[in-house]
Image: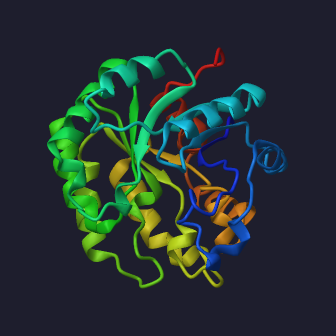
Amino acid sequence: MQIIDAHQHFWIFDAEQDSWITPDKKNIRRDFLPNELLAILTENKIDRCIAVQSRQNEGDNFFLLECAEDNPFIKGIVGWVDLCSEQVELHLKKYAQFPLIKGFRHVLEAEKDPAFMLNPRFLKGIALLNQYGFTYDLLIRPEHLKFALQLVEQFPEQRFVIDHMAKPRIKDKEITQWHHDINLLAKHNNVSCKISGLVTEADWHNWTLQDLEPYLDIVFSTFGKHRVMYGSDWPVCNLAGGYDLFFNAINIYTAKFPIGNQELFWGANAVAFYKLNEDN
């Protein structure tokens, strides 16, 4: 069975550019580069990965491309582009020349306006993605789900994926409204969901699989076997126990599924969504 980590990050730490990595997150306030991840992937028998942007500038795209050129286990990149720019199509044409760039993401959760994704200029950018074959990762929180629904309804041909299950408030055991809203999004077949980033929404030091299970049950049942994929959110997962702890918990959870469903979740769905191939 092929296993793909569909969501992880690399960075050379810079306190100004990485201001979200506050002093209380001291164990990720350093560089994280491919050689460190490769050792972890090898230990866990994980074959490939998707590198996702962590900075909202195009320099980060080229940094990730350099990482991938030297490390063939990186099979795809989710970069960043200013979708509100009047020059966005020129940028998309430029990135279409790089087969490793599979799609883009914006840190929507950090925007002051929770409806930022419905800004007409942003929508014009989203409208161009599909013609160049690009996916879009939605980095949002529960309060953004109602706006994300309005977004995806406008673009039924665009491939969207929700990062980190929209960060449900697991630590506070809040589930009802998140369940309602994510269920509405799951009704759209062009929307997939990453099982990633959950442990940092739980109690960092005391979470258990039992804390995650109610949320996992909802996503696996609503999105179905073809629209869920695994992502570690490394190195951010180090805040809550590290790579192995989350990977092993998800292994235990998915062991109850038929082998075909497991193969889809652990690799085949990511291959299909990001259109990965061995030629990259």
Query: Which quarter of the rendered picture does the N terminus lie within?
Result: top right
Q: Is residue 189 left or right of residue 1?
A: left
Q: Is residue 32 above or below residue 77?
A: below
- Residue 97, image x, y percentages: 50, 15
At x 47%, y 22%, the residue is 95
Residue 258 in view of the camera: yes
Q: Is residue 84 above or below residue 102?
A: below
Q: Nearer the viewer, residue 216 or 76?
A: 76
- Asked where in the image residue 81 lies, by quadrant, the reply is top left
Left or right: residue 271 versus residue 163 is right
Locate residue 203, reporting x and y percent.
56, 82
The colouring scheme, among rainbow, by chain, secondary structure or one colour, is rainbow
Residue reaching furthest to the front: 16
In the rendered view, would you say 67 is above or below 257?
above
- Residue positioned 20% across, 33% down in the render: 124
Q: Residue at x 27, y 68 (%)?
A: 143
Q: Is residue 263 visible?
A: no
Tell me residue 116's x, y (percent): 23, 54
Closer-to-camera residue (39/195): 39
- The picture places residue 38, in percent across and down from the top left corner, at 80, 43
Name the residue located 29 percent from the left edge and 35 percent from the top edge.
85
Q: Is residue 183 left or right of residue 167?
A: left
Q: How many marks can you see?
A: 0
The C terminus appears in which quarter of the rendering?
Answer: top right
Q: Nearer the viewer, residue 216 or 255?
A: 216
Q: Is residue 26 left or right of residue 275?
A: right
